Image (tube, rainbow, N blue to C red):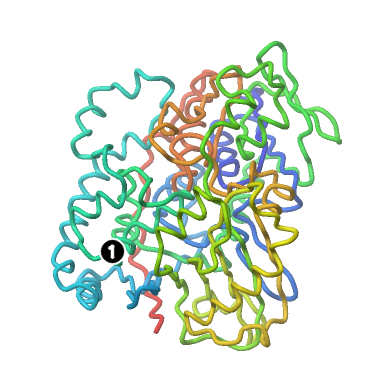
């Protein structure tokens, strides 16, 4: 494809992966990123010797990224050091009890038995059934859905009894486990999609299965280091990566995109890939008159994920007693979710997540210090919550709640702090309504009902990232890059020779034993 040019808007994980794949096919690729670093939400905050992941901290199912690296002649394990965690995370229940989630099946059964002896007998059944579900559904996640005919394909219709779309995720887990704490341990992963397990489709039981089957990893340097490595490889391959280039306008001839304009000038292209937040990009870059299915009015009526209240704390001392990942699930979890998704108010007893990465990766902080990454799921931007007013008090509440996982008085140990609210996600990061997980993943917004990888409202425009099929989460976003890049390449007459590249086996890692 020498001479054919592609412009990619946004250097998040989907944009970076698309750049690698399209460059491997010979396209001239220009990657434009408005920030001064790559990664988007998967970037790194670096201050005063501390390094924090801005967004994702769980690295799951490396096989997809391995296949993308293989397409450009690289091996993932040569480029990125991955540490497999055991326990993967520790769950602390407000209703009482803890669960160290380990990928070692016998130990996991024993941990479940400490909460609910009868439920421990069904854990292997859950894994076996979801192994079959994943095997049969994987091809669906690897192909585009460009219309209703794709949904009515015979192979997908045959899967309906296995997928049970009439059940919620919690309803699906109720088939195996009676104790609500055990069900929560295997359904809270719906928060990766910004959804409640009581509303999330049952298909997504494969999320927790993937963790136990393939592991939860920490990339040394954090997930942001993965983005930086991808950008380095892209530059070495000849991708023109331009930072600080905010796309101000998409240039159209009729409905066909012919390029983009930044303050530095215009970039013509034969195809345009948008990796920016979907709803935000449409509102900002595409005239409403050019969009039929996805007008501003129709976007506003869609369901969006929750947001997150974030605290990034550089602290004195080490927390050797705290696991790499700790998740506190409040006693009245359903009410907490109602407050996030329906009433849009701030919970006084929220669930939260803390990453204590320095127990695995001391490089993230100065000697004798630690990083604490604190995430609280909250409502996306809503008139009920004024973050200018609420943020200081909510900070105090969250710091108090850290005592529930044994951190004691954190305040006196803080030497660096940054806070991000939903208003910041919207204002500083151009995320529509601050919904950090994009469009919700309900049945009315999946497959062909999600904005399509070959964007249906415009010509020559393709989408990649959490706002298109298959959805949110790093491995799924990497898969969206494979789907989108294949579509684009086929449309421009390229021969895709990386489609059949199988991921190289990931060596069995040394488990990081976290007491």
* Quadrant of the rendered image containing residue 109: bottom left
Residue at image x 58%, y 79%?
400
Residue 511 appears left or right of 137: right
Residue at image x 69%, y 24%?
269
**Secondary element at image label 1:** helix
* Quadrant of the rendered image containing residue 388: bottom right
Estimate the x, y position of residue 168 in percent, counting from the top left.
31, 45
Residue at image x 34%, y 77%?
96
Residue 25 appears left or right of 158: right
Q: Relative to residue 74, is residue 373 depicted above or below?
A: below
Q: Relative to residue 181, is residue 130 depicted above or below?
A: above
Estimate the x, y position of residue 42 in percent, counting from the top left.
59, 54
Residue nearer the viewer, 203 or 130: 203
Residue at image x 47%, y 29%?
486
Residue nearer the viewer, 415 or 50: 415
Q: Quadrant of the C terminus?
A: bottom left
Tell me the residue that label 1 is attached to: 180
């Amino acid at each position: 494809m020498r001479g054919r040019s592609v412009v990619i808007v946004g250097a998040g994980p989907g944009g970076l992966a698309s750049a690698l794949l399209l460059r491997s096919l010979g396209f001239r690729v220009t990657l434009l990123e408005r920030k001064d670093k790559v990664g988007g939400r998967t970037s790194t905050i670096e201050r005063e010797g501390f390094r924090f992941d801005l967004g994702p901290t769980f690295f799951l199912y490396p096989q997809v990224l391995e296949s993308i690296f293989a397409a450009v002649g690289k091996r993932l394990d040569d480029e990125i050091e991955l540490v497999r965690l055991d326990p993967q995370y520790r769950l602390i229940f407000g209703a009482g009890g803890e669960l160290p989630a380990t990928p070692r099946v016998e130990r996991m059964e024993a941990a479940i038995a400490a909460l609910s002896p009868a439920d421990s007998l069904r854990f292997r059944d859950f894994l076996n059934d979801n192994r079959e579900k994943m095997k049969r559904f994987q091809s669906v996640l690897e192909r585009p859905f460009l219309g209703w005919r794709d949904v009515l394909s015979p192979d997908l219709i045959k899967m309906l009894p296995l997928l049970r779309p009439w059940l919620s995720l919690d309803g699906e887990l109720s088939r195996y486990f009676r104790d609500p704490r055990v069900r929560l341990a295997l359904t809270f992963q719906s928060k990766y999609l910004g959804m409640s397990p009581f509303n999330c489709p049952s298909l997504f039981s494969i999320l927790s299965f993937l963790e136990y089957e393939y592991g939860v990893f920490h990339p040394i340097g954090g997930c942001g280091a993965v983005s930086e490595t991808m950008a380095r490889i892209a530059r070495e391959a000849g991708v023109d990566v331009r930072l600080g280039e905010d796309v101000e306008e998409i240039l159209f001839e009729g409905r066909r995109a012919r390029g983009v304009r930044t303050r530095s000038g215009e970039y013509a292209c034969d195809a345009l890939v948008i990796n920016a937040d979907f709803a935000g990009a449409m509102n900002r870059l595409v005239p409403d008159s050019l969009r039929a299915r996805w007008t501003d009015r129709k976007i506003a009526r869609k369901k969006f994920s929750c947001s997150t209240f974030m605290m990034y704390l550089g602290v004195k001392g080490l927390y050797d007693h705290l696991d790499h990942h700790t998740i506190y699930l409040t006693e009245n979890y359903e009410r907490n979710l109602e407050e996030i998704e329906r009433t849009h108010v701030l919970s006084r007893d929220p669930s939260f997540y803390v990453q204590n990465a320095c127990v695995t990766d001391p490089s993230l902080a100065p000697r004798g210090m630690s990083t604490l990454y604190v995430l609280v799921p909250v409502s996306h931007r809503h008139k009920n919550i004024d973050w200018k007013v609420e943020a200081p008090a909510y900070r105090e509440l969250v710091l108090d709640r850290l005592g529930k996982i044994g951190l004691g008085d954190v305040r006196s140990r803080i030497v660096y702090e940054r806070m991000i609210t939903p208003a910041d996600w919207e204002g500083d990061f151009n995320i529509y309504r601050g919904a950090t997980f994009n469009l919700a993943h309900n049945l009315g917004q999946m497959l062909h009902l999600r904005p399509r990888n070959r964007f249906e409202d415009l010509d020559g425009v393709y989408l990649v990232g959490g706002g298109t099929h298959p959805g949110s989460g790093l491995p799924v976003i990497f898969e969206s890059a494979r789907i989108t890049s294949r579509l684009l390449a086929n449309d421009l007459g390229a021969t895709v020779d990386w489609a059949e590249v199988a991921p190289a086996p990931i060596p069995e890692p040394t488990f990081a034993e976290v007491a």
